[in-house]
Image (tube, rainbow, N blue to C red):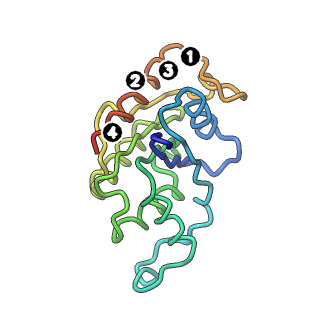
Amino acid sequence: MNDKKQVIAISGSARKNSANLRLIRAIEQLTSKFDITIFDGLTALPHFNPDLDRHEPPDEVTRFRQTLRHADGVLICTPEYAMGVPGTLKNALDWTVSSGELSGKPVALITASTSGRKAHESLLLTLETIEAKIVEETQYVIPFIQVKVNAQSQITDDETMSEIQKLVSAFQEQMDGR
């Protein structure tokens, strides 16, 4: 029997080997507490359009929503683009507004970029609006991520490693308490 929590990880970057994707892989290596599945269909989701969401949404949206429904928690690692949220990530979250997959769902949010503060604030507002279960201990802003996670998906900065370990523990507790 597998008692591990199932976590869907979403990288807000569309790049194939982004620092955020490497950070997700580093977190995978750090924990045996949950199984992480990386959602790689962010760029395949159509632009959000309420007219497409009336009876049968597009197949990609249905698959995304089912993936979220079956998860015990969601880990979002994202960069900041032009002082804001990457469009593909915001688009994905918009598809959950009417269907509620993130309502009450534990979410860990890591914004890892050169700065990241503006995107982080904006994402928190969106996540609160769609009623995701997010607490201070499950969010973290990592400035200058490129020098803190190497090409082998290893966290090379001691402070970042310590904060990520705390976040992972808090995220696990949040999922256990659900």
Residue 44 vertical position relative to residue 107 in the rendered view, above or below:
below
Nearest-to-viewer mark from 2 and 4: 4
Q: Earlier in the sequence, mark 1 or mark 2?
A: 1
Residue at 53%, 13% (x, y): give it: 158
Residue 160 is labelled as 3
Q: Check disc 1: other Cα within 10 Å, few if <14, some if 14-19, many if 20+.
A: few
Residue at 62%, 28% (x, y): give it: 146
- Residue type marked 3: Thr
Q: Earlier in the sequence, mark 4 or mark 3?
A: 3
Q: Position of residue 178 (x, y in %)?
A: 29, 45
Residue at 46%, 82% (x, y): give it: 52
Q: Looking at this view, is 91 or 152 the one in front?
A: 152
Q: Earlier in the sequence, mark 3 or mark 2?
A: 3
Horizontal side of 153 relative to 136 (left or right) equals right
Q: Earlier in the sequence, mark 4 or mark 1?
A: 1
Q: CA distance from mark 4 to mark 3?
A: 24 Å
Q: Position of residue 154 (x, y in %)?
A: 64, 24
- Residue type marked 1: Asp
Horizontal side of 81 relative to 99 (left or right) equals right
Q: Check disc 4: other Cα within 10 Å, few if <14, some if 14-19, many if 20+.
A: few
Q: Which residue is mark 4?
A: 176
Q: Earlier in the sequence, mark 2 or mark 4?
A: 2
- Residue type marked 4: Asp
Residue 116 vertical position relative to residue 82 in the rendered view, above or below:
above
Q: Which residue is mark 1?
A: 157
Q: Looking at this view, is 55 or 169 the one in front?
A: 169
- Residue type marked 2: Lys
Q: Which secondary structure lies at badge 4?
A: helix
Q: Which secondary structure lies at badge 2?
A: helix
